[in-house]
Structures are given as structure tokens and as C-alpha cells.
Amino acid sequence: MNRTLYLGRKRVGIELRQFFRDRESAIFNFALPMILLVIFGSVFAEQSVGFGDVTFSQYFLAGMIASGVLYTSFQNLAIAIPMERDDGTLKRLQGLPMPKASYFLGKIGLVFVAYIAQVTVLLTVGVLFFGIDLPSSAGKWLTFAWVSVLGLLSCTLLGLAFSVVPKHGRGASAIVAPIVLVLQFTSGVFFVFNQLPTWMQTFASLFPLKWLTQAMRSVFLPDGASAIEVSGSWQLGLCAVVLVGWTIGGFILALLMFRWTPRGSS
């Protein structure tokens, strides 16, 4: 176990160097949320979301932080792993005496470190350029912590599982990016959720991002803003249950589906 953890920490450093060395990956998973926040926040800066003086910028910040979970975990892994599978990286790692768990610990460490850096940038931009007030209570920061952890775990495991879907690494982004975009449009990131069609709300409720964005809004919006939610409340207990369920489901799917070699190879 000690050797697994030690090599896992080493893998985190390797994964981080590779991640930031790849400009396309860094833009997709790190800079994109910041760019979208600046664009949408500037265009709709003073637009109200239907509760008091809560602006769309503040509403959108919560959605982009939730999207950051999806970018750094699911999207990043579902695109990068097929490339590693194609170029033989996974096959070489499989043949090493390194415990396989260390590879996955490296990926998890990469996701958490990249997310922390991304959130720091998003919060800084939100405060400096859009005058967004950060949570002032320990309870809200605690909610932010457990929502982030559950979101990262569930989306990381789902990314590991989904990485088997693209047949080739070069086509992975064409499969993964549209899925992420559809989830953002239907989960209350780009639009106020209660203004979306009912069928779209129902569809979004099947996936983690809707519950991530809802829980993040409970952190960054005033308590009374829960009135604009479809249910009239933040439903944090239900958010936790759904995210735990997706974490367990993602773990099972990752165990069953993850491949070290391309499909059809020996």
C-alpha cells in the first residue's frame, strides 16, 4: 500500500507536467471556464435572474465552477486517455511493475490540483471584474468542499469509464466536447434552470452536472435565492445522494469498462 501511494504521488507530478505542457488540453480544461465567465459575465452583467439584486454574473459563476468539475475530470480524462491508449503509453505502463492503482491515483491527483487552480482563477476574476461576493459563512464553504469532492470523484470515475468509447484518440474530443456542451445547456449553466422547458429539466436531472450546479448555487447565491429553483429549495440532501450514486456507479463502470489497450488488439 505504501508503495502504491508513493508511486501514485510520483504519477501526480508527471500527470501535471504533461497536462500543462499540452496547450490544447490546458485551454479546454483550464482556461475555457474563465473565458466563458468573462464573455457571459460581461454581456449579462446586470441582468437579474428573478430574485432581488442577484445578477446573472453571480448565477453564472456557480455554473462555471460546476462546469470546471466536468472539464477537469470527465472531459480531460475522456479525451486524454484514448490518446494515451493509441500511442502505447497505457500498454507500456501496464507492463511496468508499478501497481495499476498508482496510475489512477495520478489521474485523480491531476484532476484535484487542476480544479483547485481553476477555481482560484474563476473566483479571482468574479470578485475583481464582476464584484461578486464570496460566501461569508463556514457552512457554505463546507458545502462547497463536499460538493467539489463528490463532483470530482463521480466525474473522474465516469471519465475513466467513458474513455473506452472513442475508438481513436484523435476523435475523442469530437465525441466528448458535444456531450459536455449539451449538459451545460440543459443543466442551468448558460440559462436560468427554471426557465428551461420541462423536458429539458427532466433530462438534465438524470446527470450529475444539474445537481452540481444546483448545489454550487446554494454556496454562491443568497439563501433566499432558492425560491428560483424548480423545487423552491436547494435540495442539498438530494444533491448529495445523486452525486454519491453517480460515484458508486462510475466506480463500477470504470472497473468493468476501462481498457489498457485499443479495442481489437491482443
Image (cartoon, grey):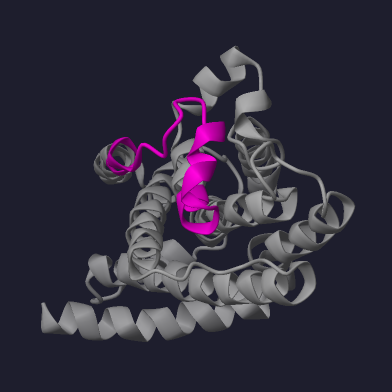
Q: Is 80 contained in the magenta span?
A: no
Could you tell me which residue is drawn at 86 percent across and 58 percent down? 42
- Above or below residue 112? Residue 62 is above
Which corner quadrant holds the N terminus? bottom left
Taking the image as shown, residue 129 lies to the left or right of residue 149, namely: right
The residue nearer to you, when weighing 130 against 120, is: 130
Query: Looking at the image, which residue sits at the far top?
Result: 199
Residue 176, image x and y in percent? 62, 42
Quadrant position of residue 178:
top right
Taking the image as shown, residue 118 lies to the left or right of residue 108, namely: right
- Above or below residue 67? Residue 228 is above
- Above or below residue 215? Residue 41 is below
Asked whether residue 264 is in view, the answer is: no
Could you tell me which residue is drawn at 81 percent across and 45 percent down? 47
Could you tell me which residue is drawn at 69 percent across and 68 percent down? 126
Q: Which secondary structure dominates the residues rendered in magenta? A: helix
- Magenta residue span: 216-240
